[in-house]
Image (cartoon, helix red, strand yellow):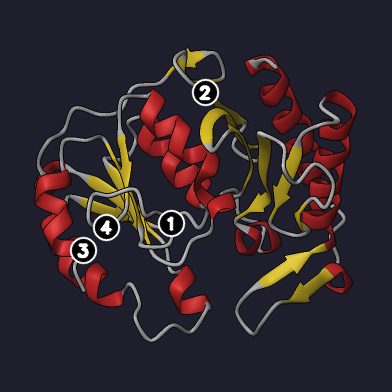
């Protein structure tokens, strides 16, 4: 079980997504609801990852966005958490901000992570206690400690789900306090960019564990902080906040609905 294994697996899955994107047709796009889409490529990439994991680690459990938890090995201490294409809307619309996200947890503790953004030519990866990297370079969160000097990102999964309690009030409060705001459409990329020091922070509501499992380890191994909106461990159910660890005190009061 090595860092190279998960990196290479994510890159091969990313290559598959990139190749299949070139021939994607409207017939290969399905609708979970009016705003939420899935493609045959999402399913093909997840199938590929699960099959490769089954060959390498036949006793491990898997949990993916498209096919859920594996029925075999459900009680394993090891679980691989997979988002085959995080940012499917970007993928369908020909935009580069989508990624393959894979994380491995042992007894619920993040151990390995990889986020491959194939259209960007970057793979972010981390191992617990060994740091986080992108294409061989070590990652470190930024040093900016004031919101006014910060660039943050966010997302609107809450709006896709038509939730009454949504991110718009938070967005309106936070954005005027910032140097800038970005919207990439992939929580895995958002968190990888926090780990790389390209963003000072990221927040979003209504995410799932497969959206943030890899990003969590990337951020923490790069020296950052991941929490729910109250600073606790209730993420993603109680909101997800990933930062460089220096802007939390100023940002967190703004996250209260």
Badge 4: few (under 14), some or many (20 or more) residues near its Cα, within 10 Å?
A: many
Which numbered disc, 4 or 2, marks the residue closer to the eye?
A: 4
Kindly report the distance in space between the C-alpha atoms of the residues bearing marks 4 and 3: 6 Å
- What residue does disc 4 label? 229
Which numbered disc, 1 or 2, marks the residue closer to the eye?
A: 1
Of marks 4 and 3, which one's residue comes earlier in the chain?
A: 4
Of marks 1 and 2, which one's residue comes earlier in the chain?
A: 2
Badge 1: few (under 14), some or many (20 or more) residues near its Cα, within 10 Å?
A: many
Q: Give me the disc on residue 236.
A: 1
Q: Give me the disc on residue 74.
A: none
Of marks 1 and 3, which one's residue comes earlier in the chain?
A: 1
Image quarter (top left, top right, bottom left or bottom right) of the C terminus = bottom left
Which numbered disc, 4 or 3, marks the residue closer to the eye?
A: 4
Disc 2 + disc 3, Cβ < 8 Å: no
175 or 157, which is in the foreground? 157
Q: Is residue 132 left or right of residue 81?
A: left
- What residue does disc 3 label? 255
Disc 1 + disc 3, Cβ < 8 Å: no
Q: Is residue 190 left or right of residue 148?
A: right
Which residue is at 52% across, 32% downward?
Answer: 110
Kindly report the distance in space between the C-alpha atoms of the residues bearing marks 1 and 3: 14 Å
Kindly report the distance in space between the C-alpha atoms of the residues bearing marks 1 and 2: 20 Å
Q: Quadrant of residue 136?
A: top right
Disc 4 + disc 3, Cβ < 8 Å: yes
Kindly report the distance in space between the C-alpha atoms of the residues bearing marks 2 and 3: 28 Å
169 or 175, which is in the foreground? 169
- What residue does disc 2 label? 126
Q: Is residue 223 visible?
A: yes
In the figure, 124 relative to 155: above or below? above
């Amino acid at each position: 079980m090595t860092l190279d294994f998960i990196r290479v697996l994510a890159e091969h899955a990313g290559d598959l997504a990139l190749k299949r994107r070139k021939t994607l047709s409207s017939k290969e796009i399905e609708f979970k609801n009016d705003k939420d889409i899935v493609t045959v490529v999402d399913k093909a990439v997840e199938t590929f990852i699960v099959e490769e994991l089954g060959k390498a680690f036949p006793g491990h459990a898997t949990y993916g966005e498209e096919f859920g938890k594996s029925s075999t090995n459900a009680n394993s201490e090891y679980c691989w958490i997979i988002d085959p294409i995080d940012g499917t809307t970007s993928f369908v619309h020909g935009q580069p901000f989508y990624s393959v996200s894979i994380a491995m947890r042992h007894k619920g503790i993040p151990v390995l992570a990889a986020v491959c953004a194939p259209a960007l030519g970057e793979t972010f990866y981390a191992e617990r206690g060994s740091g986080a990297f992108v294409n061989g370079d070590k990652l470190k969160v930024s040093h900016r400690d004031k919101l006014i000097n910060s660039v943050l990102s966010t997302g609107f999964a809450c709006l896709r789900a038509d939730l009454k309690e949504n991110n718009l009030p938070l967005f309106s409060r936070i954005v005027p306090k910032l140097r800038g705001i970005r919207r990439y459409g992939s929580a895995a990329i958002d968190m990888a960019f926090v780990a790389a020091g390209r963003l000072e922070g990221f927040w979003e509501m209504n995410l799932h564990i497969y959206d943030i499992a890899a990003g969590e380890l990337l951020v923490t191994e790069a020296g950052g902080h991941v929490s729910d909106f109250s600073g606790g461990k209730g993420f993603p159910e109680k909101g997800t906040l990933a930062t460089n660890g220096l802007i939390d005190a100023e940002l967190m009061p703004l996250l209260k609905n």
